[in-house]
């Protein structure tokens, strides 16, 4: 059971509800979102009668769920969560496209890419400054210098920036520059990191762990939300299966399942899902047809020279062509792209 307090509730009101729950032998967990305090009554609440809390000072309503994740569930919130990223609305029924290189490599590379993807209709710029590379000998990212270059690209293009944070101690630095904090597949269950981003007020793009179930993924979203940050965007990026013709297997089923289970926005990253440029288009369009709220696509000025993920990166021309197809498929399933700076 979740007791949702009204925005006007006082601290005494909250403590009173907590005291009442504890006097009945329940533990509680408090979280806060947009000025609203939520009190989760933990444990088996089947015998707990609603009137115990209903009508108490400051109590707005009760919500029920039998899911191990609560705040992320549709039981808790029926209406879609819409996340505003500097004016770009994610989850409002329009498709949002995030594009850019895997890694920020140089000033020229990121600025050139930012302009190209914006001109092709992208809504946000991606680029890694802290890179979670499988080998310790691979390029690890430029760190703060990379973040500064992303900020310069934002200044020039107006595109909000999405970039990965890998460790709790990096969160203040990355949050200082980024508009969206990306949690990579390898860190989906890095609980101290989820806690740390949960204490910021920046939107979080939470990628699915490559070996995680949808339920485990939602529990990770719950870690972030339970620390007060409800601005979570889920990103399906492919999971490991026995199939090795592609880098991962895009679980396109995750889109309708999540749309049923959670009010959080869901986007698809076809690039990491397939790992090969030739297959990115099909996976992208499948994600759009399945009802994704957005896409994250890797684009590079010269993929053959990319420092990371070149084989799956699109050229500028390929990305522009794909955007035309995305518009057509979105229209076919009753969606449309979010307005861009040029069209807003
Ligand atoms: C990335 O977005 O560049 C990345 C490393 O993604 P993932 O965590 O999905 O592998
Ligand atoms: Mn990548």
Image: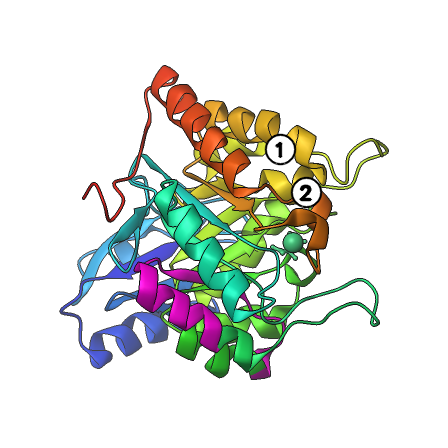
Q: Residue at 62% across / 71% down in the picture? A: 130
Q: Callout 2 environment at 10 Å: few (<14), some (14 to 19), or many (20+)?
A: many
| Picture coordinates of residue 322, whole percent (x, y) | 49, 30
The picture places residue 312, in percent across and down from the top left corner, at: 68, 42
Q: Residue at image x 58%, y 28%?
A: 281
Total numbered badges shown on the rendered structure: 2
Where 6 sits versus 218, above or below?
Answer: below
Helix, strand or loop status at disc 2 = helix
Residue sitting nearer the eye, 194 or 115: 115
Q: From this view, report whether residue 202 is shown above or below residue 274.
A: below
153 magenta-colored: yes
Extreme-left residue of the structure: 8
In primary-sequence order, the first of circles 2 and 1 is 1
Quadrant of the displayed image that contains ligand 2: bottom right
Task: Name the secondary structure under disc 1.
Answer: helix
* Residue at image coords 85%, 34%: 244
> On the rendered image, what quadrant is the C terminus found in?
top left
Residue 179 found in image quarter = bottom left
Seen from the viewer's position, the closer of residues 271 and 303 is 303
- Front residue (pair 117, 64): 117
- Whether residue 207 is in magenta: the answer is no
Tell me if mark 1 has few (under 14), some (14-19) or many (20+) residues whose alpha carbon lies within 10 angstroms of its own: many
Residue at the spot 54% in from the left edge and 34% down from the top edge: 318
Disc 2 within 8 angstroms of ligand 2 (CB): yes
């Amino acid at each position: 059971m979740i007791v949702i307090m009204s925005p006007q509730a006082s601290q005494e009101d909250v403590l009173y509800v907590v005291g009442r729950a504890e006097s009945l032998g329940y533990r509680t967990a408090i979280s806060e979102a947009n000025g609203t305090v939520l009190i989760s009554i933990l444990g088996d609440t089947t015998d707990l009668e609603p009137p115990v809390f209903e009508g108490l000072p400051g109590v707005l309503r009760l919500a029920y769920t039998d899911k191990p994740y609560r705040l992320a569930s549709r039981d808790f919130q029926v209406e879609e969560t819409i996340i505003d990223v500097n004016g770009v609305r994610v989850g409002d029924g329009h498709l949002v496209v995030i594009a850019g290189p895997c890694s920020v490599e140089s000033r020229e590379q990121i600025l050139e890419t930012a302009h190209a993807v914006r001109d092709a209709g992208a809504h946000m710029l991606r680029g890694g400054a802290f890179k979670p590379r499988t080998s310790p000998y691979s390029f690890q990212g430029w760190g703060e210098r990379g973040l500064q270059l992303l900020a310069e690209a934002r200044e020039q293009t107006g595109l909000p920036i999405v970039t990965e944070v890998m460790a709790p101690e990096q969160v203040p630095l990355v949050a200082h520059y980024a508009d969206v904090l990306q949690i990579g597949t390898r860190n989906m269950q890095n609980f101290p990191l989820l806690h740390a981003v949960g204490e910021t007020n920046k939107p979080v793009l939470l990628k699915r762990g490559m070996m995680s179930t949808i339920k485990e993924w939602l529990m990770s979203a719950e870690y972030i939300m339970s620390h007060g940050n409800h601005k979570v965007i889920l990103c399906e990026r492919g999971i490991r299966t026995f199939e090795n013709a592609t880098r991962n297997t895009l679980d396109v089923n995750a889109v309708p399942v999540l749309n049923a289970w959670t009010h959080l926005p869901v986007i698809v990253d076809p690039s990491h899902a397939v790992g090969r440029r030739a297959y990115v288009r099909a996976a992208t369009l499948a994600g759009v047809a399945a009802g994704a709220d957005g896409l994250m696509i890797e684009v590079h000025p010269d993929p053959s020279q990319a420092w990371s993920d070149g084989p799956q990166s699109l050229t500028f021309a390929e990305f522009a062509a794909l955007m035309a197809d995305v518009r057509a498929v979105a229209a076919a399933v009753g969606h449309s792209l979010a307005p861009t700076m040029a069209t807003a």
